Amino acid sequence: MAPLLLALASCGGGGGSQAVVVPPPVIIGPTANSVTAATSTAKSNALCATIAPFYWEIGDQSGSLASGSIGTTSSGTMITGATQVSIASGSKWVYGMYVVELRGSAAGLTAADIPFMNFTSGYTNIGNDPKTAKCPASNSPDTVNACLTTLNPATNLPYSTQDPNTTGKFDYDSGHFENHASQLGSLGDVPLVSLGSTVAAQLGGGVDLQYTQPMMAFAVYTNSDQYAELLRRVLDGSLKMHDALGTHAVCTLPSASCNAVQSPIPEAWHYSIGHWVEDDSSTHGDGAFSSAGALGFYPWIDAAKKYYGVISREDVAALASGQQAGYASAQCGRLIRHAWETGVAQTGTIPD
């Protein structure tokens, strides 16, 4: 298989672009060993044990190919594909899908859209902590536009404020999508009770999405079954995100060679249209596309756009203690993915 070429910006914001060669995953599966290897990794790998309880699933555009529930909640119940959870930043990929559909194609994204979609727009006055109330229910009407009038107590500036110090640099902040949704016009005045159905309708309907706040970046409440359906639509091309995967990507980890502001992921991944590109060679990154949420929800599509996967869980305790629940799920999830694609159970902390 030829190497995957992604057009990635050389640093966290503007500047030229360079062709970055991302090693493709070694795809063998599904073989007779793939289900066993993925299941064993989910059950036995130490990084997966630390995030239990959770539900995992791997599939292709036709449906689920392997799945399982690991551990039980404090009430003794298992998490399944039907278990409703707050997906936090898993919402970002949903919004990315929505915008690409609204524009008609990946190529239809405008020059104005792209900085919002890859988090370089400078609208960074909200933050990205889902445990902190962002849009009070007392807002009337309870909409994206009303939310943007809220003052950030740390800066005493409205959420609609653009920061010239972060403009052109990657900064993981909910303000990008919130301000884009307002300027887009189609969502700004949609009442909270209708926000989920409005977004779902643009994605082909038949998917149950609810928003707990009018926050496009982290407020979706749904389940793995519903999200997996969206991923299958991406894989079969019925959602135009298929061709947007990995495009307009920017570096995210602040360093001498990357002028990003801050990232919740401690690896040198890139960020594309509402999703990550897992391409850090130091951890054997395979170029998968993903959207890890702070509460532990982790959806992905492999670099070859052949398989999707989901880890579903909601770890409120980890969030309260400041742990990276989304990254923890990603560490387990990429091991399950690699076990599936190679047919070899993963026992280490990074893919073999």
Image (spheres, helix red, strand yellow):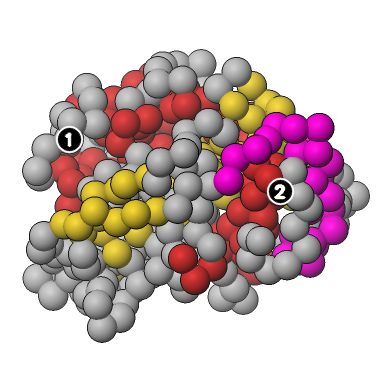
| Left or right, 44 with reference to 180 | right
Count residues near mark 1 (Cα–Cα under 10 Å), then give few for <14, some for 14-19, many for 20+. some
Is residue 57 part of the magenta span, yes or no? no
Side of 31 where 272 appears, left or right: left
Viewer-proximal residue among 48 and 191: 48
- Chain part drawn in magenta: 26-49
The disc label shown at residue 109, or none: 1
Nearest-to-viewer mark from 2 and 1: 2
Residue in front for this viewpoint, 12 or 150:
12
Q: Quadrant of residue 9?
A: bottom left
The one nearer the camera, 184 or 340, is 340
Above or below: residue 171 compared with residue 87 = below
Point out the tag, 2 or 1, that comes first from the N-terminus. 1
Cα–Cα gap, marks 2 and 1: 35 Å
The reply to whether residue 160 is visible in this rendering is no
List the residue tagged with mark 2. Answer: 339
The residue drawn where x is 46% and y is 70% is: 267
Q: Position of residue 202 (x, y in %)?
A: 34, 21
Kindly report the secondary structure that dominates the magenta region of the rendered protein.
Answer: helix
Residue 343 percent across, percent down from the top left: 74, 43
Q: Does residue 269 appear to the left or right of 25 in the view shown?
A: left
Q: Is residue 75 above or below residue 301?
A: below
Which of the 4 image quarters holds residue 321?
Answer: bottom right
Q: Residue at x 35, y 59 (%)?
A: 270
Q: Position of residue 178 (x, y in %)?
A: 27, 49
Query: Looking at the picture, which amino acid does disc 1 mark?
Result: Leu
In contact (CB < 8 Å): disc 2 and disc 1: no
